[in-house]
Image: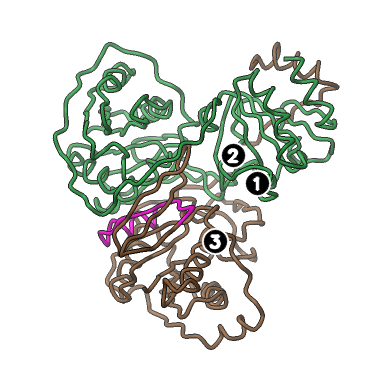
Chain colours: A brown, B green
Amino acid sequence: MKVLVPIKRVIDYNVKARVKSDNSDVDLANVKMAMNPFCEIAIEEAIRLKEAGTATEVVAVTIGAKTSQEQLRTALALGADKAIHIETDEKLESLHIAKLLAKIVEQEAPELVILGKQSIDSDNNQTGQMLAALTNRGQGTFASKVVVADGKVNVTREVDGGLQTVALSLPAIVTTDLRLNEPRYASLPNIMKAKRKPLDVIAADTLGVDLTPRVQLVSVEEPAKRSGGIIVEDVAQLVEKLKTEAKVI
Amino acid sequence: MKTLVIAEHDNGALKPETSKTINAAVKLGLDVDVLVAGLNIGAMSEKLASIAGVNAVLTADNAVYEHQLAESMTDLVLSLADNYSHIVASATTTGKNFMPRVAALLDVAQISEIIAVIDADTFKRPIYAGNAIATVKSLDSKKVITVRASSFDLQGDQAQAPVTTVEMVSASQLSRFVSVEQTESERPELTAADVVISGGRGMQNGENFALLNGIADKLGAAIGASRAAVDAGFVPNDMQVGQTGKIVAPNLYIAVGISGAIQHLAGMKDSKVIVAINKDPDAPIFQVADYGLVADLFDVLPQLESAL
């Protein structure tokens, strides 16, 4: 079974995003970038499927500028067998990404595609579901457990108020939630080995996908700051304030 | 054109997100129809029809929709989509699951988790875990939108609107429901609670979270946790409040032994009143707290429980 794992280069999750002074966007100049945390979980799950003998090949794919090859090399160091870079300098939306990925799905014919449930920059939570729609596959989103057996994948999903398990016929699309696994770190020998693994580059505009923007970014602002509060002396004063001033209890 | 809202429910009762999502939909300035899909939802359809601003209720009552699987929900919504310029659902795990699928098949973008409606095309939404707020304008003729319900108000009541039946039955075989495991709790759900009390790494271990129980009982509160507490293995992941966990905006949020990492603040800073209890006076949580108490939580929690 071949597993395709689309990944994204994003701001490192330990770095606080700052808004540009002209409010045009978030300032990413000289900011530390990394693989999106949910994508790390997706890579880890694919590698575990390979280690378990369920998957035979893990292919990582990303869409973005040349710099995103760093994240593909990380995926290769973690255990992916080959990588595909769809190169573009355009800022693309989830629908564009899903359409480009659908072309790769057509080419590679993976039985399972595992993606992160959302990226921590645009916070859209759309690409996996859109890819499932465009390729007419079943979807198991926000997965905390993935079991492949008998031409099916059972996905346990983190839903509001509990866990839901669905069975999808393969081929299928899975998106990862936090509890699915704990991603490993790449070892130094594997980082060296990754440099020799295949990485194909495809120009995004050769895939025949309309990349016209559908959403205009009008402005980006800092969120409203909370006005500073007060320090209370003790529990009695706290309860008094909550009752008479804030009136919330 | 009109707006179609898809109701959020658990087959037994409407969730409060539905009313708040209708509140957001009304701001689009168009007539609002509401679709409710599930099994044995007759009584719920009547209730929906009495929510202010609802023009008509469309009921799809069939076993196929009992678990609101993305594939069948998408077929259903697409069968109605021609009549609507805006399709709106709450950004719950149900809405987040099927709405992008609907958008892709309509060949339009989805605008995720809006927190404000500027006009029928323009919305505000948080990005970078709420560290920035983007104003975005949809250029598509049809809009697919999910709503962060905690940013909108509950709607009032009205005289009952008409309820009609949708006959369309999805035949999708792509996915099948296997099982559901509800978190057993007497307490309200984190995202719906009026009061939330959360513990952080300062709780020291999982057993100490029991210190929050008595307070939560008295306040009718849900109990949450910071990512640090979850990562340390004190409590399960579904209690996590933060960027990668639940986003909450209760009337009262009490942070106990939580330092206030960006990742946590992103999940609770829209709460109406924030109380922080921490023995470190320099903890960043105090910068967003309305009321701070610099003290050892192990002294404070029993006192607080008896004072309530």
Q: Residue at x 47, y 80 (%)?
A: A81
Q: Which mark is residue B239?
A: 2
Q: Chain of mark 2?
A: B
Residue A209, placed above or below residue B43:
below
In contact (CB < 8 Å): disc 2 and disc 1: yes
Q: Nearer the viewer, residue B136 or A175?
A: A175
Q: How many marks overall?
A: 3
Residue B107 is left or right of residue B280, and the answer is left
**How far, Cα to Cα, is label 2 from label 1?**
8 Å
In front: label 3 or label 2: 2
Q: Chain of mark 1?
A: B
Find residue A5 and report its image quarter.
bottom left
| Residue type beneath disc 1 | Val
Residue B188 badge: none
Q: Tell me the element at label 3.
A: loop
Query: Which region shows up in magenta?
Result: A125-145
Are labels 2 and 1 assigned to the same chain?
A: yes
**Quadrant holding the N terminus of chain B:** top left
Residue A126 falls inside the magenta stretch = yes
The amino acid on which the numbered mark 3 sits, given as a three-letter code, is Asn
Between B191 and B143, the one lying in front of the other is B191
User: Which residue corresponds to mark 1?
Assistant: B230
The residue drawn where x is 33% and y is 53% is A167
Q: Residue at x 65, y 25 (%)?
A: B273
Local SS, label 2: helix
Query: In the image, residue A179 lies at what x, y percent?
Result: 55, 52
Could you tell me residue A108's position as x and y percent?
Answer: 33, 76
